[in-house]
Image: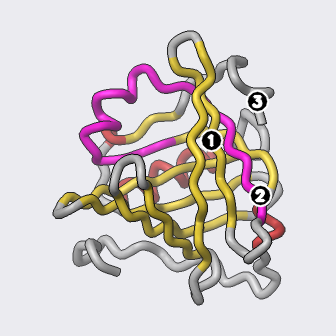
């Protein structure tokens, strides 16, 4: 994978013969986020739990809409994850920020949690993002630890990892 450093390759997607994009669709809560990007470091203290709604597109890709509290309003960010030949691996482009994203579902059981890894590239800058999504606002402690361990395996430090504080704001937005 381009941008990966020796010893920090992204773990393979769990071998799930029943892997299906339809199983990952629906509403998720953003539980944990980790990144080495300057933007994340400057904003992480203000971040709160968000919702992410994943819906399939007619051409087999995924529309992903994240809704999160920002000051006194609910902000939405939309992206289309374009499927690749590798199950659980997607590509996306952010016209707003001019960045390219490679997104991988690292591990999921579909009905409780999903661990994702993304590499975002803008020019010569490459950033890592690890996220933990849950079907509910509260996940088992061992899943939080699994998320932190994955982030550290990707070269991120404790200072790069946030368990997002609970909020009721923007949670019913879809």
Location of the N terminus by quadrant is bottom left
What element does badge 2 sit on?
A: strand
Question: Which span is picked out in magenta?
Answer: 33-56
- Residue 70, image x, y percentages: 52, 20
Q: Nearer the viewer, residue 158 or 36?
A: 36
- Residue 143, image x, y percentages: 63, 50
Q: Residues within 10 Å of mark 1 (few under 14, many from 20)?
A: many
Residue under label 1: 66
Location of the C terminus by quadrant is top right
What element does badge 3 sit on?
A: loop
Residue under label 2: 55
Tally the numbered discs.
Answer: 3
If you read the primary sequence from the N terminus, does the residue marked by circle 1 or circle 3 appear first? 1
Residue under label 3: 173
* Alpha-carbon span between mark 2 and mark 3: 15 Å
Magenta stretch containing residue 106, yes or no? no
Question: Is there a contact, CB below 8 Å, between mark 2 and mark 3?
Answer: no
């Amino acid at each position: 994978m381009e941008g990966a450093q020796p010893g920090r390759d992204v773990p393979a997607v769990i071998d799930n013969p029943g892997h299906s994009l339809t199983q990952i669709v629906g509403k998720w809560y953003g539980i944990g986020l980790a990144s080495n990007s300057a933007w994340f470091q400057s904003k992480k203290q203000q971040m709160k739990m968000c919702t992410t709604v994943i819906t399939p597109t007619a051409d087999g890709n995924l529309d992903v809409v994240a809704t999160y509290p920002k000051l006194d309003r609910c902000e939405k960010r939309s992206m289309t994850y374009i499927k690749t030949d590798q199950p659980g691996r997607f590509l996306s482009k952010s016209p707003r920020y001019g960045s390219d994203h490679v997104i991988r579902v690292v591990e999921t059981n579909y009905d409780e949690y999903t661990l994702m890894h993304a590499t975002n590239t803008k020019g010569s800058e490459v950033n890592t993002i690890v996220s933990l999504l849950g079907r509910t606002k509260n996940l088992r402690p061992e899943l939080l630890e699994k998320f932190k361990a994955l982030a550290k395996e990707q070269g991120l430090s404790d200072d790069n990892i946030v368990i997002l504080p609970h909020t009721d704001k923007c949670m019913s937005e879809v």
